[in-house]
Image (cartoon, rainbow, N blue to C red):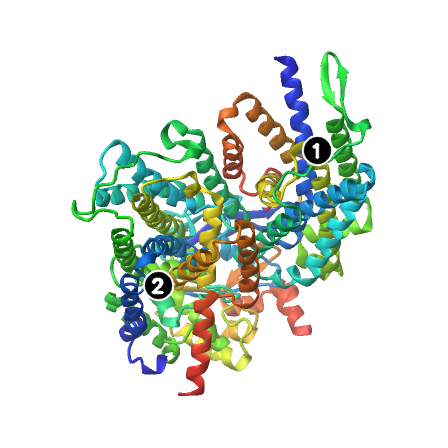
Amino acid sequence: MSAVLSTRGLAKRFGSLVVAQDLSLALPRGVRYALIGPNGAGKTTLINLMTGMLRPDAGSIFLGEDEITSLAPESRVKRGLARTFQINTLFPSLSALESVTLAVLEREGHAGTWWKSLPAYRDAAGEAHEILSSLGIAKDAYRLTRELAYGRQRLLEIALALATRPKVLLLDEPAAGVPKDESADLFEAISSLASELTVLFIEHDMNVVFRFASRIIVMVGGRILVEGSPGEIARDPEVRAVYLGKAAHG
Amino acid sequence: MLASLASVLFDGFAYGMLLFLLSVGLSVTLGMMNFVNLAHCSFAMVGGYVTVTLANAFGWPFFATLPAAFLSAAAASVVLERTLYRRLYRASDLDQCLFTIGIVFISVAAAAYLYGTLQQPINTPPTLQGALEFLGMRFGVYRLFLIVTALVITAILVAALEYTRFGAQVRAAVDNPRMARGLGVDVDRAFAITFALGGGLAGLGGALAIEIVGLDHAFAFTYLVYVLIVVAVGGLGSIGGSFVAAAVLGISDMAGKYYFPQLGAFFIYLVMIALLIWRPAGLFGKR
Amino acid sequence: MHSAVTGPHAHLQAQVRWRRIEIAFWLCTLAPFVAAPAYLQLASQIAITALFALSLDLILGYAGIVSLGHAAFFGLGAYAAGLLSKHAWGEPLSGLLIASAVSAAVGYAMSFIIARFRHLALIMITLGLGLLLHEAANSASWLTGGADGLQGMKIRPLFETFRFDLYGRTAYTYSVVVLFLTFLAARRIIHSPFGLALRGIRENATRMPAIGAPSHAHLRKIYALSAAMAGVAGALLAQTTSTVSLEVLSFQRSADVLVILILGGAGRLYGGIVGAIIYMVARDQFSGISPQFWYFWIGLLLVVVVMFLPNGILGGLAKITARWQRKAP
């Protein structure tokens, strides 16, 4: 099976601080990956490297067969690699619908058009509305982003990424700051996404990880410790020692 | 030709040292708080007018007016910082810009109201007049004095920053204010003191500038551009960067005026833009 | 407001619709002919300044580009129109278009630099480019007349019929019609997909690449469009006054237009126009006092606006009406 997104030997350092080392991965189509590891393991760095927000010092990144290592972030998005942010990175004074419509228009290549009226793009607005309702936030579509409840804003994060029609979706702690009972709903929404979409999410709550991930990647100290099915990860002695063990005792 | 080159270098370096005094405070405070204070030269103007007033109306000796210029400008900056500026630390660049331009307008108008729009005269003491002959070239004594003063101040600043506890706090705050706060550094206090110090140095610069470039009500505007160039080119928060940038700017401005008088300040602006395009964070800037 | 909306299309449509107060406002621009015929020259100046402020609003209010050197494009337009009428032909409409094209071309070239910068470096670059152009025009006195200003412009009557008379009838009509047409263009830009993308950049520049937006390309485009508009304003001033002075490129003019826009309220399309009316009328009324003291009040005004009226006069009014509507539903 060929991978949708793969990396080979990615490395990044800030001065003398090594934040990523020899990161090689291959994510196949439609798989739900959880990326776990203690704080400072380099999980967000990996997402930043994949999406081009950081330049790697070494290594390469492939989307399907194509190398994207030197592409700008927006070009990677255009080719089907989307992400969300751990801290809400939204458009506070745009309504939810406007925000998602903007993402749709960018995807369709209409966002540079300045001589046509926005309401003329009925289809884009309709599609945006559909995305919002698929995530259960259509009720809030016409409210300004900054007026939305926090949990809704987390969903809007995902809606913006979905509007780019990704092949691979990287979710950086989608449930960060969301109360436990709500985070299950959020992951229900994530797991009901189209089955051909490859999803990788960072998450700290092990119950959630083992419930929603079909594969798990464990990172420690800027390296990939192990990658495997939830069963393999749960049995892995090294993982138990450095990560789960600690969590179990603490 | 050689003699003229030497004198251009000398005069330009002296002028650069003046720009350094005027801008070093802004560079450090900008590095700490990212606060765009376009009114920095208003503090210089305070110093300049204090010196003029004390020397001309009260008959103080020139040397005695210099500490007064420093102190009054420092006091003015403390008052402004404590009452108004601190409310704007989290405001946008634009708001900071507009607010401080407003302060510039007010200070320029106040100076015109109090002192009129003419150049202010100053009598320097005889010891600072005339020139020294050396290898057939003449070096103005006042400019020598200016250079020595600036070098001494630079040495003190660098040493204080490097070897004192307060200096370490300031360096930490410039590097990463959030982390410094986490480590227990009182960044607000460090900033207030640095701001006062920077304002005071600008005031001293303003007082020393009268003899070289003159002083009128528009000073806060005229030299704003030069100070901003020094800061932007030198890099935020870098004393060494400001020093080099000020020296280069002073010499190239003098050279431009001497060799290509018809170009005016064109040359300087061109150099600045080219440098910024080459290194957006300045010559010595990290960000 | 949103409770009345029924679908996604209607939601977008509601923001584009012309409001009654807008139509009333544009009807009011006819008033000077009847109410203050002696002030048509001033009215024409106000329309030109409003157009200039509108052009700044496009980059500052909508795309978040802070510029301390926007007079560069105003001045380019003015000199282009002036030189054209002096050396080639004096037909005003074609002059306006050519001047606008010159400004747009220079603006587009500069935008490749501008789009790469933010914060202090951006302020410095815009300031530096503005000063550079000012110095260049000063030095090239063989072309621009230097500090004496450009002499010898010959402007033909508008449509070969309407002369630019002493009372400013033609000047005001011409200026206000051009202002209105440019305003329509600006309004369309704001309410287009591109306008939405600009608001996206202003609201959150880091998110834009993550939704696949080529932010730099967007910024370059709006910068060129804004420069074109500023060029039209400059050309209007040159043609209606038949002179171009070095002042059109000055830092003072850049600062003034910023004050005007902020006073009225940035990012609101009408902010620049309202600001221009208030600023210019006040300056005319207080023309007796010397310029230094005029700037004292401007300085005070800036301080007060930043402290107490962060969204300008229109922002303040919007807040008051919103509160009022909530109280009396």
As helix, strand or loop, the secondary structure at mark 2 comes to: helix
Say which amino acid is labelled 1. Answer: Glu
Which chain is indicated by disc 1?
A: B
User: In this rendering, is residue C35 above or below C81?
Assistant: below
Q: Position of residue C146 (x, y in %)?
A: 42, 32
Asked whether the beta carbons under mark 2 and mark 1 sit within 8 Å of each other, the answer is: no
For label 1, the crowd category at 10 Å Cα-Cα, with few meaning under 14, some 14 to 19 and many 20 or more, is some
Image height of C2 relative to C292, above or below? below
Q: Which of C221 and C39 is in front in this view?
A: C39
Residue A102 tag number: 2
The answer to which of A132 and A241 lies nearer the viewer is A132
What residue does disc 1 label?
Answer: B211
Count of labels shown?
Answer: 2
Residue B71 vs residue C238, the one in the foreground:
C238
Q: Which residue is drawn at 50% across and 67% down?
A: A88
Circle nearer the viewer, 2 or 1:
1
Quadrant housing residue C81: top left
Of the 4 image quadrants, the one containing the C terminus of chain A is bottom right
In this view of the protein, which residue sits in the foreground, C209 or C312? C312
Residue at the image position 36 percent from the left and 48 percent from the top: C230
Residue B132 numbered mark, or none: none
- Can residue A3 be seen here? no
Tell me where residue C269 appears, x and y as whole percent. 37, 62
